[in-house]
Amino acid sequence: MSAFGAGARSFRRAAVTLLIAAALYEATARSGYFAAALLPTLPAVAHALWAMLMDGTMLRHASYTLYRVMFGLGLAVAVGLPLGILMGRIPAVEHFFLPLVSVLMPIPSLAWVPVFILWFGLGNVTTILIVFYAATFPMLLNAWSGVRSVNPLWMRAAGAMGANGQSLFWKVIIPGASPFIITGFRQAFLRSWIAVVGAEMIAASAWGLGWVIFDAKEFLNADIMLASLAVIGCIGFGFERLVFGSLERATVLRWGMVRTAKG
Amino acid sequence: MLHIDVDNVSLLYDTPAGRVSGVHEASFGMEESEFLCIVGPSGCGKSTLLNIIAGFLAPTSGEIRIGGKVVTGHGMDRGIVFQDFAQLFPWRTALENVAFGLEMKGVAKAAREEIALKQLQLVKLEKFARSYPHHLSGGMQQRVAIARALAYDPALLLMDEPFAALDAMTRDEMQRLLAEVWRETRKTVIYVTHNVAEAVYLADRVVVMTPHPGTVKTEVPIRLSRPRDPLSVEFLEHQKQLMRHLSEQAAKV
Ligand SMILES: Nc1ncnc2c1ncn2[C@@H]1O[C@H](COP(=O)(O)OP(=O)(O)O)[C@@H](O)[C@H]1O
Ligand SMILES: [Mg+2]
């Protein structure tokens, strides 16, 4: 009951913030200081969004983008999660990969776009690989920290109760590291989502939310650009809240392993 | 043959600052179904000794025999309860925590849950079988930990100050409960504490350790009938006797 009340309250607070921001924007757009083509009013943006939703193009752009994110994120999880876990468990693996990770991680994923275009051309392969690059490190680093932060008392207690090898891994280390692993999923998704839009601007052809924005620039279609930005924000926010929020509620929050985030 | 034989056990910790004595030439024996308390000042090596008996640490010299067999690592013939409440698995309900050892033994789900529920009844927590540890108080969590350590029926139960982090009233309650559990199960128990009254309340025999580098100083049998009355003259006599042993050493340091 109280959780629901808190949820409603935080929702109201968020709505107030967003409404104020929208009102300020609208006032600026209508002030006449800027050309309407550059700073379209909210109804104009809404109109552009509606039109793109109705003719199905927005859905298609969003599907392309989501497909690239899911593919790249899936690869990143498939590589980053096991590798991070192995690094946390086996010193030799850690020693081998840590320098590589340390060197690659600070390179912004978008800096690779021209290189990848050179190697793989425009299109899905490049954008998916950029997503993969952006998402792997947060996944890997969180899995690595998670495994290392498993309470040694759990390992001792489990060991005393006869757990070893496989059972220790699946029944203690993985759930013990789950708060970090879920944070890893979350951060990996956010990085993917940011990276895909950037990558699509340069490396996509014809479809994708990032591509729409870049393409609209050619025709000074600020309303389409802003409509696409709104969609990008909404999908990202929705995923964050719905997918990762419910994953957390079903696991680490239920187990009391992390505290409820405020807001 | 003694059931448990701790034979001249020493352990040195390797630290960056050099070798530190954890426990020094400790020896004692135990009969089956005996409740033994180890008391000694903080830092004397009680936990070290218990961890050696549990098989988590290998002694630098000396050996431990359980039923004649030398201990070389941890095993399911021993159950262990730590002081820290965080020992329970937060992702498992009380029942699932208690069933863990049986699960590792390969006992089928229905059977192990039945046994686990019995163990929870023993510590009077059957109503909380489906609760996660973070919804239980510290005392309840320690009771779950005791049930968990007993569930797979180890020959020897090791406890390292399990109630030291509880408030005084809860601690008294826990001690009564543990005495009851022991009366019903008749496990062989090694119970580490720095609380003299707790030792007199629970133990058949108390092993007193010297301050760091700790060794066994003396053994004091507690021949009081159970359940014990902490306010009786005999109880207080035993308590005083233990206190004297402990303060004599403190004076020597
Ligand atoms: N992991 C460790 N590394 C180095 N020294 C340790 C370690 N654990 C304990 N010690 C030292 O060994 C001695 C005994 O510690 P411990 O067994 O924890 O004592 P107690 O449980 O009686 O308080 C102490 O002096 C402590 O500083
Ligand atoms: Mg200790």
Image (cartoon, coloured by chain):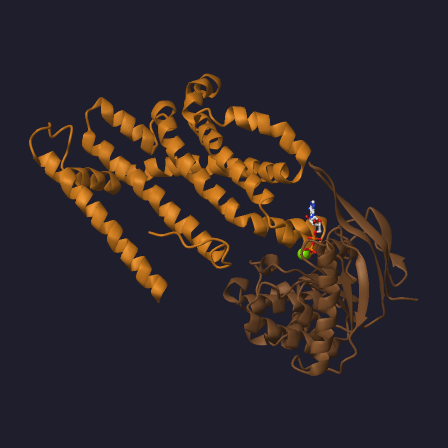
Chain colours: A orange, B brown
- B51 with respect to B117 (left or right): right
- B231 with respect to B56 (left or right): left
Q: Quadrant of the N terminus of chain B?
A: bottom right
Out of A120 and B138, give the one closest to the viewer. B138
Height in image: A44 above or below A245? Answer: above
Q: Percent x, y for residue A86? A: 63, 38
Q: Percent x, y for residue A238? A: 35, 47
Q: Percent x, y for residue A201? A: 34, 26
| Quadrant assignment, res B105 | bottom right
Residue B138 in view of the camera: yes
- A139 with respect to B177 (left or right): left
Residue located at (42% from left, 49% from top): A243
Query: Which residue of the protein is positioned furthest toward the top in this rendering?
Result: A118
| Quadrant assignment, res A33 | top left
Residue B158 in view of the camera: no
Height in image: A198 above or below B33? Answer: above
Q: Percent x, y for residue B50? A: 75, 57
Query: Which residue of the protein is positioned furthest toward the right in this rendering?
Result: B1
| Quadrant assignment, res A49 | top left
Query: Which residue of the protein is positioned furthest toward the front in this rendering?
Result: B251
